[in-house]
Each structure stands twice: as structure tokens, then as C-alpha cells.
Amino acid sequence: MTHATIDHARGILNPTLAHQKFQICRYLPSPDLAFFVERYWTIRWDLRGQPPFTQETLPYPCINLAIEENHSGVFGIETGKSVRLLENQGRVFGVKFKPGAFYAFFNAPVSNLTNRSLPLSDVFGPPARKLEREILVLDDDSANIEMMEDFLCERLPDHDRTVEEINGMIDCIIQDKSLTSVNQLAQRSGMSKRTIQRIFKRYVGVSPKWVIQRFRLHEVADELDSGVVDDWSAFALRLGYTDQAHFIKDFKAVVGQTPAQYARMVRND
């Protein structure tokens, strides 16, 4: 079985330096799983003889299943930035589920996973241990994907219209940069603000406000990675912020640096 690959770095902070330290491959799922799975991914690194590397990312509003020696699990959304220390040599194979789509596998509010993780067997039972062993032994992306797809297809839940509605709203957030509030999202979707907040908490694990802010921060990081910003006030306004101070505060609260500091760091690496 072959799977189309995906090539983009959104969410990875300082991607130019990151791609010197590890290799990431992303693959599309088969049609049978495309409703639930955004993509499969593999990260490999070999830093033997080099200092450890700290990688930071801005997580998406998605649940990830990851298989790694001594670190496998189902990982909920981290509401801050994600920080991972890479050292020596290693590999991780993962599944990124579409926003809201893991709810059908989990059968409980996904907010229970926010900022935490669970062992695979706590979610999928004892068979998950066998799957983990087989994937750890075989360092072959295509074979790993086939094993994971067989495992998920055996447990495939029914399609849930709410997942479609959530992903439709998220597509709207991504495509329309002028959408910066939950009230606007409610107007576009035809749902009440309260309904949107309820289904996002249950299915996605975070609030719709968090999702909007996170995608806007992705856009900020992408632009800072790709060039110099000459007019910060105009830049903040274009991203939907009413003033520059609010924009800087939001960025620093998550990334740990002001936009200007981050831009200088990226240029210097």
C-alpha cells in the first residue's frame, strides 16, 4: 500500500533549525480512515555525538497517538507550546486525528485528555500492546501505516455528523483570517455560541476561542519564519487584533518571546 506524502512545517517553531536536527515524514490516510485521521507522521533523529536539541511546537487542536520506545500513548491537546528534548537517536510513529474525530474512539469527553496523556492500552485495551511492539520492531513507514490502519479499521466507529460540523467550522477559521471571535463563528455556522462551546469541549477538548487564537498564532509564526515585519501595528491589525499590545501579549504568553524576539532568533539561527 502506498500513501501520498504531505510537506509543510506549520506549528513547528523555528523550522529551519528544526529540520537540521530531525526528519519528519507525513502521510495521508486511506479513504476508509480519512473521516477520522488527518495524517500519519514519523519523526527520526540521530544526534549521537551532538548536544541534545529542544524542539518547540504550537500544537493543533488534534489528538495524537504516538508510538515510541518507553513513551507511547494517546496525547491530548497541550494548551501552551509543546517542548520536547531530542537526544541520542530515536524514532516516533504517530497518528494525528482530525479535530473532534477521536471522540468516537474515546467514548468520553475529549477535554479529559487536555494537557495529559494516557497509555495506549487504557484507551484501546490489551491489543494495543501487541501493536506497539510490532511497530517498534519494524522501522518501515509503509508497513507501520498498514498495521495501524488494520488496527483502527477493526475498531472503526460510525461517522458522526458533529465531527463534520466541527471540521467545517475549523476550515472556516483557517480560510477566513478576519474571523477572530466565537460570535463570528456562531454567525457563520448557524449555531449558537453556547452550542459551539459545548461541542468543542466535548469533541475537541479545548474551547473554540482557543482554536481561533491558535490558528492565528500559527499564521504569525509562519510569517515571522519567512521574512521581516516592518510595521508591527499593521501586521497585528491584519491578523484580527485590535491593537499591537494585545497581539504581543498573546504571542508571548504562548511562545515565551515577543514576536520581535522570535523573529530575531529565527534570523540568527
Image: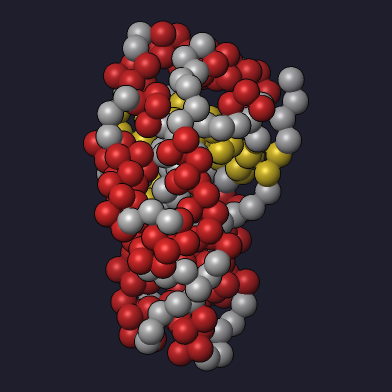
Residue 200, image x, y percentages: 34, 47
Residue found at x 73% / y 35%: 4
Q: Quadrant of the N terminus?
A: top right
In the image, 227: left or right of 242? right
> Could you say where residue 235 lies in the image, as x and y percent from the top left?
51, 83
Q: Is residue 258 above or below residue 43?
A: below
Q: Quadrant of residue 209?
A: bottom left
At 51% from the left and 89% from the top, the residue drawn is: 234
- At horizontal 66% and vertical 27% (from top left) the residue drawn is 31
Q: Nearer the viewer, residue 163 or 89?
A: 163
When the figure is inspected, residue 168 is found, relative to residue 222, above or below; the finding is: above
Q: What colour scheme does the image use? A: secondary structure
Residue 247 visible to an observer of this rendering: yes
| Res 112 quadrant in image | top left
Query: Where, quadrant-wise, is the C terminus in this rendering?
Result: bottom right
Q: Nearer the viewer, residue 141 or 32?
A: 32
The number of discs equals 0
Q: Nearer the viewer, residue 138 or 171?
A: 171
Q: Is residue 140 visible?
A: no
Q: Is residue 63 above or below residue 73?
A: below
List the single residue furthest toward the front: 190
Measured as percent of width and height from the top left, residue 163 is found at 46, 38
Residue at 65% from the left image edge and 35% from the top image edge = 28
Q: Position of residue 93 (x, y in %)?
A: 53, 30
